[in-house]
Amino acid sequence: MKKLVLFCASILVLFFCCSTIIAQESIYLSLTSSAKRFDIGIEDFVSENKSKEEIEFAKLLQAVIENDLLLSRYFNIVIEDRIKDDDVKNEMLDYWKTTGVGTILSASVSKFDNDVVLDIKLLDANAGDVIWKRIYKSNVSNYRYMAHSASDEITRVSAGEFGIARSKIAFSNNTTKHKEIYIVDYDGYNLRKVTNDNSINILPKWSPDGERIAYTSYVYNNPDLFEINIVQKKRYALSRHRGLNVASAYSPDGSTLAITLSKGSGYPGLYLINNNGEILRQLAVGYFISTSPSFSPNGQEIVFVSDRRGIPQVYIMNVYGGNIRALGTDGFCDSPSWSPRGDKIVFTMRQHNAKNFDLYIYDLHTAKTTKLTKNKGNNENPSWSPDGRFIVFSSDRSGKEEIYIIAIDGSGSRKLVEISGRSYTPSWSTSNTKQ
């Protein structure tokens, strides 16, 4: 009973302190199944009309795309001046051959009134032939999104994987002395606050279509579940039962949500609700706590945390609440998240006699658990990138809670964004978001 009370207390403490494509042509590149990165040469993007604004936009667009390709970790980048005429072209092709680069990225930029056009292509470094090209057009205010779109296509054509450059991350931050919900591009740009309640807003979760965010708010002096449509800029109350309405997760088709409800003074348990907030069925309810749900990609199972065996452990059940089985963890666990590839589950765990929480990955095929973070403060609230290759999480390694991203092999950890205050409970959009 003492452990149960402590678990309930830990939940409450967390709440209170914590451009349009206008022309296209594409040919797929041959791929290898190895993890080796692709060598790509990038020529300086040029201004079509040589105006000062065009030259500046050419530099900006190139910088965004280069950064996207580096962050994808699919590419090794070599920078070189653009090919200008046939003689230089032949010389440059010889140069690229000496570097081992097989593909060259080239682009020109033009600007008309408030629109900017990106004409971009991939060249075969051996023959000089165009193997992929596309023309993008966007309002100047959305040039970064246009560049991200191009990056995602380059990733798709080169690596055979959907890019994640247009995805966003939502999180809670207390810069304003209140906890509000913020969203930011995956690369840390375009930070903006999407709530302004002067209250406690926590635990954001993206809908599968990338347009809505469910989150818990104390704006009416109770932890209620709300949904905000960031495209329509509208907010709705999804669940306002007395007591806890927290820790939600959308089903893969976005039609239902799993949510933790205490329904007054009862034990917090998992329920399935529809988009109108109506309870469809109980999932995991009893004389124990069940919380932190996350759906499998096929929508048939849910991973969650429960203290039914004394301390919070990770479990899996089907969407009807049956076939419950333990994952085999051995510490104090929280915040499991199912990989969009379906093969792994990341979660937070503090092992016995350990001081800090760390991230762990459980491989469903091998039933093996791998420690992802180590000796760097508390690392919590993991959420997967749309391609299942990266994880965003919160960490106090700098002395305060901030948002970080790490590759699933434990390498390449980076801070997402510089922002004052403390940041908590990140959620990575499961699809490309709107501009």
Image (spheres, rainbow, N blue to C red):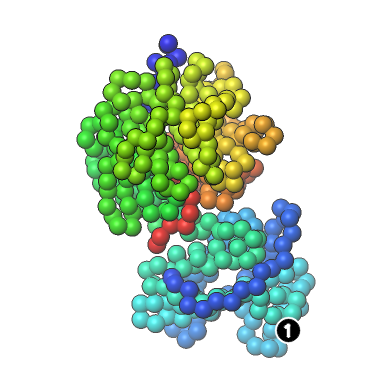
Name the image quarter holding residue 27: bottom right
Quadrant (top left/top right/bottom left/bottom right) for the N terminus = top left
Most extreme residue toward the top is 1
- Up the image or down, 193 lies above or below 224; here it is below
Quadrant (top left/top right/bottom left/bottom right) for the C terminus = bottom left
Image location of residue 403, percent across then percent down: 46, 43
Image location of residue 225, percent across then percent down: 31, 38
- Up the image or down, 164 lies above or below 112; here it is above
Name the image quarter holding residue 92: bottom right
**Residue in the foreground of this view, choosing between 377 and 321:** 321
Most extreme residue toward the left is 220
Identify the element where label 1 is drawn. helix
- Asked if residue 176 lies left or right of residue 396, the reply is left
**Residue in the foreground of this view, choosing between 105 and 272:** 272
Residue under the image location 53 percent in, 24 percent down: 313
Residue under the image location 51 percent in, 78 percent down: 23
Does residue 315 appear anywhere in the picture? no
Q: Crowding near pointer 1: few (<14 within 10 Å), some, many (20+)?
A: few
- Asked if residue 67 lies left or right of residue 250, the reply is right
- Asked if residue 42 lies left or right of residue 98, the reply is left
Q: Which residue is mark 1?
A: 90
Residue under the image location 30 percent in, 57 percent down: 232
- Up the image or down, 134 lies above or below 75; here it is below
- Asked if residue 317 lies left or right of residue 212, the reply is right
**Residue in the foreground of this view, choosing between 197 and 262:** 262
Residue under the image location 34 percent in, 25 percent down: 262
Image location of residue 420, percent across then percent down: 36, 44
Most extreme residue toward the right is 98
